[in-house]
Image (spheres, rainbow, N blue to C red):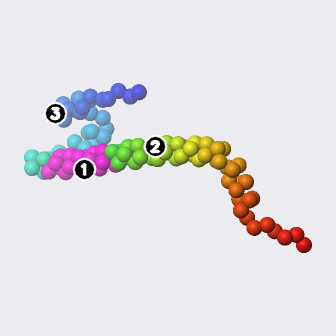
Amino acid sequence: KRKAKKPCVPGTLENCDKKDKAFLEEIKDYDESKLKEERDKMEGEISALTTEHKETQDLFEKQKDEAMATMKKAEDLKTKLSKLQNRVGYKLLILKAKTEPKKEEL
């Protein structure tokens, strides 16, 4: 397992890796409003994707529960069908044989 790294401290570059330093270089000329705009944009993207992920995960759980219930119902019906066929199947064959028109032999 990887340990979470400590956050980069922009003022001292403590705990900053190459990516952090490259981003700090990229935004060094941004004024306060541009920094806030970028932060808000990124937070919005993360928030939107987090919401979509949660909704999709919830939908999956609901569909999974429905699928499991459907599978159990199918298994129960298969068991009932098997029992019914064992109980009346031979009777049905006899009734069919007695009620079908007799074939005349040539």
Is the residue 95 above or below the residue 77 in the image? Answer: below
Q: Split into 4 quadrants, where in the image is the N terminus?
A: top left
CA separation, marks 1 and 3? 30 Å
Nearer to the camera, 106 or 86:
106
Q: Which residue type does callout 3 highlight?
A: Gly
Range shown magenta? 37-56
Q: Which residue is mark 1?
A: 48
Q: Nearer the viewer, mark 1 or mark 3?
A: 1
- Nearer-N-terminus badge (2/3): 3
Residue furthest out toward the right? 106
Q: What secondary structure is the stretch in magenta mostly built from?
A: helix
Q: Nearer the viewer, mark 1 or mark 2?
A: 2
Locate residue 41 relative to residue 102 in the image: left or right: left
Q: Which residue is mark 2?
A: 68
Asked if marks 1 and 2 touch (Cβ < 8 Å), the reply is no
Asked if marks 2 and 3 touch (Cβ < 8 Å), the reply is no
Answer few, some or many: residues within 10 Å of disc 3's Cα (few below 14, many 20 plus, some between 14 and 19).
few
* Residue 91: % across, % down: 69, 50
Locate residue 9 relative to residue 32 in the image: left or right: right
Identify the residue at horizontal 71%, vertical 49% (top origin).
90
Identify the residue at horizontal 30%, vertical 29% (top origin).
5
Q: Which residue is mark 3?
A: 11
